[in-house]
Image (cartoon, rainbow, N blue to C red):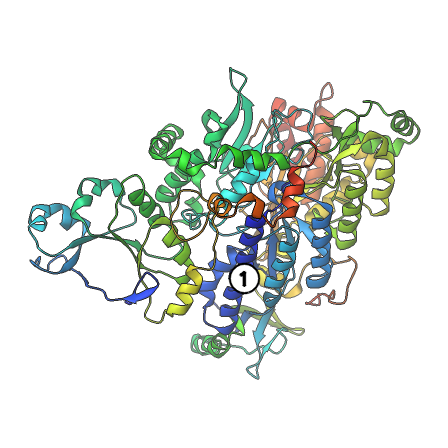
Amino acid sequence: MPLIKNGQIADDTWQVLEDDAPLPEQGDVIVALERFLAEIDQIRTRSGRTGIAIENTVDPQEVTAHLDDLDLIALDFPAFTDGRAYSQARQLRTKQGYTGELRATGNVLADQAGFLLQVGFDAFEVAADQSLDVWNKAANSMALAYQRGYGGTQKTRDKLQAARPLANTSNCALAVEQSLPI
Amino acid sequence: MAKKITGPQVLTANQLSDGMAVFLSNDNVWLTSIENAQFARSEEEATDLEACALPAIRSNDIVDPYLIEIEETEAGPVPVEFRERRRIAGPSVQVTFNTRPNGQLALAS
Amino acid sequence: MYRYDEFDTTFVRQRVDQFRDQVNRRVSGELTEEQFRPLRLMNGLYLQLHAYMLRVAVPYGTLNAAQMRKLAFIADKYDKGYGHFTTRQNIQYNWPKLPDVPDILDHLADVEMHAIQTSGNCIRNVTADQWSGAAADEVEDPRPYAELMRQWSSLHPEFSFLPRKFKIAVTGAQADRAAIAYHDIGLRLKKNGSDEIGFEVLVGGGMGRTPMIAARIRDWLPKQELLAYLEAIMRVYNLHGRRDNKYKARIKILVHELGAEEFTSQVEEEYTRIDAPRVMPPAQELERIAAYFAPPAFDDLQDDSPKFMQHEEEDAAFAQWVERNVAAHKQRGYAIVNVSLKPVGGVPGDASSDQMRAVADLAEQLSLDEIRVTHEQNLVLPHVRKQDLYRLWQELKKHELADANIGLATDIIACPGLDYCALATARSIPISQDISNRLGDIARQREIGDLKIKISGCINACGHHHAGHIGILGLEKRGQEYYQITLGGSGDERASVGEIIGPGFSSETVTDAVETIVDTYVGLRQNGETFIEAYRRVGPDPFKEAVYAAH
């Protein structure tokens, strides 16, 4: 599966570890949540980085205590219409303050890219035939967003207005509307 | 859910461009009329007929193909399912509004 | 009315471009139908029985004349010269072609309209009391909050792939004209003990195969906390709503399975974790939006217009229309006019492009450029001077828009049913027409009085049959349509779910059954009781006896 990060195809240094495979001392591995919790002491002694894959039915609060031990969290989209991982990502990024890599796996389509970035994903495992151009175009097709407090490159109205001082406004209609006698 | 099929079947789909119901004809052409539709009279023939949708799907001409059971009547094939009969008949409501250039009913009822 | 600024304009245009690109990718085959379907549904484009159907949002049911004219233009240029106003205050076009849809959306953007999230498993068009800003009984105009929610819900990054569709309705009045108890979230502006205005929050109402009346989860929510609180509700639903069964995926099932108390505590817990100031717009943003909904420039008038009173006295037909179709306005000397889209024997909610243009002209001339769409599939001219009512009525008559039947037996709600809809199991429109013709005599309708008949062509209940005083559900068995009747439903502030009275009726006999029910009511009513009042007193038995004895 190609990996997209920062709008580029990225090298994937991470290896998904089967549950029965021995835990290597070195290298970046992604393990299942259960294994991570069960072998946490051993994991802490590794020199390589560790990430977890969690299903979209898991409450992210289950890993709150271990965020410092994690360099990657992979959230799954079993179907691209199953949007639970958006809320998991949002919870991890906001109230849990997770700052490591947040990877979208499973059914990840270009037309989701904008939303995924906004809720805090920064790495995307995409289908082999996904064109990078189409991905980037879709990811940037909306330059604006109404929702405050989300990430992504989209500007909210506050930011747009801050970037455009009132004297510079080209929107005469708005100015007239607002000055109507009430 | 697969129902027990007893009678002959024809292959229908919707046109990608305008959504109109279409039927695969004896000449392997998709037509808006069921009149000359190709029949499948056995399970084998049904599987073969269904496969005939692939080229039109690949060329992005049709979407959502499926088989429907029909009865052969003097007036031609008539779907067994009520929904399919309505789908062919078009709205029972006469569109009486001001008819503009593109205002003809797409499906004669 | 709200006007787009540069931000809104750019947003909607970019959304059109994004969709144009998606359509192009579909036509070229880059997107499969399976991939494209959820994308087109996010923009209101369905593939129906005979053609595509495009549902255009009429945010909280508010339009101006220019917008209505544009809807007429689209009907003529890209459709068959008509449109269908829906129970969600939207308009549907039944015959657009896929390659034309991006162009239609561009035309809509010209008048600050769109089709964003009029379908799909996302937050749908927010609906509101159609008399907002005009109703005499309103605590506060809910439209600024409806607009705030429109913006907040548009392309929401977290809540665009919910378990199922999500509908929010808001009212500012005690009398519920927006059916808030039948919505996923229902909001009512009300005062608390200290005379401050906030929101009563209902969650988990809905129709479909498991009709439910919403539970109240907050008696009073400060207005400035609205979006943060909604975010908490949405997150609990997005994470925990069922996705294993489409028919159990609405929030009403989650509320029901958890119990309202547990659901409420999960929402409240999530709410404590939300950084509300980060989510809510600053106060000046709320003020910016609210300024657009400031009362229009009303004339200073006497409450009574002698001219109007004289016409009312001299012209009985006009007086009847006033009695049924005209409602009290908060501004002295003004009235709210309900324009019926239910001509006897007609298709409920359909309007021709000529009728749309006529309403647009009249709105401009006589209603301060405002039009509303109602969830009962009628239109409203909200700000008419009483002295202009007679002239307005005469003009409406010319366009067959003056039926004096608001709230009467022929003011029927009907979904498109199996005449158009791919999901339908039976037709609704011909049944509606048949009942309308049967009960259509205006004297008889007036004698029957307030009666809400609502017809759905399948279990999804788009025709609100559960909330009908008389509800009719069309089903199909062995190649025949048949119709189940429910009685006692109501979508207002005393919301109730109708009860099935017994075996269904054929398309030939259902109108007889409805007539028998109506006649039974007329026979047993006391002291001017309405149908629903009488039903609540006597229950279903007298109706069952009459119907099943007669058929």
Location of residue C13 with respect to C198 vertically, above or below: below
User: What residue is shown at x 47% (from left), y 63% (from top)?
Assistant: C36
User: Can you give x and y, in whole percent of width and height, for residue B39 in the image?
Assistant: 54, 77
User: Can you give x and y, in whole percent of width and height, for residue C190 in the image?
Assistant: 55, 23
Location of residue C424 with respect to C87 vertically, above or below: below
Whether residue B27 sits left or right of residue C387 in the image: it is left
Whether residue C359 sits left or right of residue C494 in the image: it is right
User: Can you give x and y, in whole percent of width and height, for residue C275 in the image?
Assistant: 37, 35
Residue lying furthest right: C314
Residue C46 found in image quarter: bottom right
| Type of the residue with mark 1 | Asp
User: What residue is shown at x 47% (from left), y 58% (from top)?
Assistant: C38
Quadrant containing the C terminus of chain C in the rendered view:
top right
Q: Using the image as rendered, state which of residue C389 and residue C437 is in the foreground.
A: C389
Location of residue A128 with respect to A30 vertically, above or below: below
Residue C93 visible? The answer is no
Instruction: Name the secondary structure under disc 1.
Output: helix
Residue lying furthest top: C193
